[in-house]
Amino acid sequence: MGLFTEAEFWVGVAFLIFIAILLWAKVPALATKSLDARAEKIRAELAEAERLRKEAEGLLADIRARREATERQAAEMLANAEVEARRMEEEGRLRLEEQIKRRAELAERRIGQAEAQAAADVKSAAAELAAEAAASVLAARLQTTTSDPLVDKAVAELSSKLQ
């Protein structure tokens, strides 16, 4: 009977009764069911995470492809812009050369016209000067003589011609 007086014995009996009550109340089945539910929830979350990871990888691949396409398009646009800039530069240079040539021709024509006008002005001035000199010489001759020798000669000839 020494066994029934020991506290450890009664603690062991109480523990066995507690275990029996837990088994009778199906606590291990409930715990297993709860753990299985939690494991299923974790599996679903893992499956969702895997699906999201695959979706993210697909989006990343799509974004990379778009970026590469955009970079190619940007490179093409830049190359086209450079070609267009060179073409416009060449056109501008040709137009400038053409404009310089036209202005040089216009300047040469104006210079030629100015030279012709100057020559005409010089001739006109020379003719006026010659006319003034002739008038001055004739006036001086007329003042020194009382009669004009040409007129005297013409009058003398006139009388011989009238007879």
Image: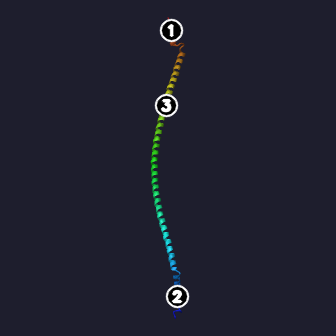
How far across and down, in percent of the image, does residue 80 sit? 45, 49
Q: Vertically, is 150 above or below 65? A: above
Q: Nearer the viewer, residue 5 or 104?
A: 5
What label does residue 46 carry, if any?
none
Which residue is the site of mark 1? 158
Query: Residue placed at 48% from the left, 68% from the top?
Result: 47
Of all residues, the one furthest to the bottom in this rendering is 1
Whether label 1 touches label 3, CB < 8 Å: no
Residue 36, percent across and down? Answer: 49, 74
Q: Nearer the viewer, residue 148 or 33?
A: 33
Report the Cα–Cα distance between label 3 and label 2: 139 Å
Amino acid on which disc 1 is placed: Leu
- Name the residue located 46 percent from the left edge and 43 percent from the top edge: 91
Tell me the element at label 2.
helix
- Residue 13 is marked as 2
Looking at the rendered structure, the kind of residue marked 3 is Gln
Q: Provide the residue designation for mark 3.
A: 113
